[in-house]
Amino acid sequence: MTALIQADRTDFSRIVVNEPDLFECTVPRTLVHRAAISEVLLTGISRSGEDTYRIGAQWSRGHSYYGAVAGRWHDPMLFAETVRQAGLLLAHQVLEIPLGFSFLTEATSFEVAESGARLGRGPAHVVLEVTLHDVVRRRGVVSSYAYDIVAQRDGRRIGSGRLTANCVSSAVYRRLRGDRAEATAPREVPNGINPELVGRTCEFDVVLSAECGSGAHRLRAEPDHPVLFDHPVDHLPGMVLMEAARQAALAALGLPEGLLVACDAEFHKYVEFDSPCLVMTSGDVMDASVPPSGSRHLRVEFHQAGDVAAVCRVTVHDGSET
């Protein structure tokens, strides 16, 4: 064996993974509503009780959008996306909800320990213990459900999550949305906030406009973004709103390298493409004269057409040692 071939051989036996059968390959992308295989985070599922399931998820150290935070942590937004994908996998594989149904998230949340998000020498292999509850069926088809998640990494608990959703057929969804069922994201978006203020390096990844008075920002999203718009949608996705809440918190706190350790989101209305949506923060905004000391809590509201369309309560770890 030549030196070149020897150097290219990886000893996978050194990678210790709990429950390795959950981490052999990604689940089918259609089951988690992703167009790009690279955006699939889930890697396996097994039943562990009457209403409980164990799901594997892998968090990359180098995701194209949810990359390492401050060179120290996995981006916890990977956990938010993991929570979302887990519910879709259960919906199709366990609850037998047909592909083609639309899922309307009422609320979702997660919290993760700062230590649980720390980067290691390889990707993070996370085991989710998921409990289904409040499953409602109409005419034999599930119309709503909820689930709770406990996340473990290397055998220890690192966080939790939950989600509540309704689901409807494509025909019902079209009736609900009316003319907006065919809406598309606008090609022109307002200029973004300075990316460095929200932990980003380019405007393409920024989802807030420059400040437009009283600390508010307009919500913006590049329609060609390969992660935020993995596939066509007729309104702003919930993950975009949660990312906007994170960026609004980092800007308000003056902590571009802060770590989002919790987000509790409630979605009251669709955020539409055809009118401005203002993103407004309130709460524990840090006084620049006071040294950082732990975690900060903020409330982020999304205002559109005179209504509060969504609310996110976020917690940001400021990077101090714990």
Image (cartoon, rainbow, N blue to C red):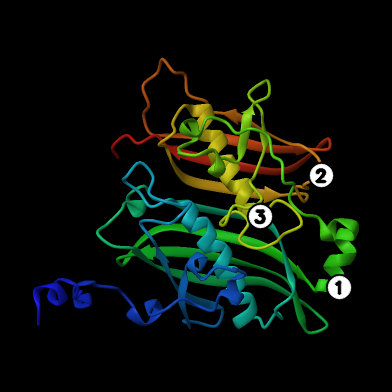
Mark 2 and mark 1 residues within 8 Å of each other at the beta carbon: no
- Residue 313 appears in the picture as rendered: no
For marks 2 and 3, give the CA distance. 23 Å
User: In the rendered view, would you say 129 is above or below 286?
Assistant: below
Residue 246 occupies which quadrant of the picture?
A: top right
Query: Which of the two labelled residues, at mark 1 and mark 3, occupies the earlier sequence position?
Result: 3
The residue pinned by badge 1 equals 171
User: In the rendered view, would you say 142 is above or below 238?
Assistant: below
The residue pinned by badge 2 equals 274
Residue 136 rendering spot, x and y as whole percentages: 74, 74
Q: Going 56% across and 43% down the picture, which residue do you hit?
A: 204
The three-letter code of the residue at mark 2 reads: Asp
Callout 1: SS: helix
Please tell me how crowded label 2 is: few (under 14), some (14-19), or many (20+) other residues with Cα within 10 Å: few
Residue depth check, mark 2 versus mark 3: number of the one nearer the observer: 2
Q: Going 37% across and 26% down the picture, which residue do you hit?
A: 292
Residue 315 rendering spot, x and y as whole percentages: 49, 40
Q: Going 83% across and 66% down the picture, which residue do you hit?
A: 173
Residue 46 rendering spot, x and y as whole percentages: 47, 82
Please tell me how crowded label 1 is: few (under 14), some (14-19), or many (20+) other residues with Cα within 10 Å: few
For marks 1 and 3, give the CA distance. 23 Å
Query: Is 204 left, or right, of 160 in this rendering?
Result: right
The residue pinned by badge 3 equals 107
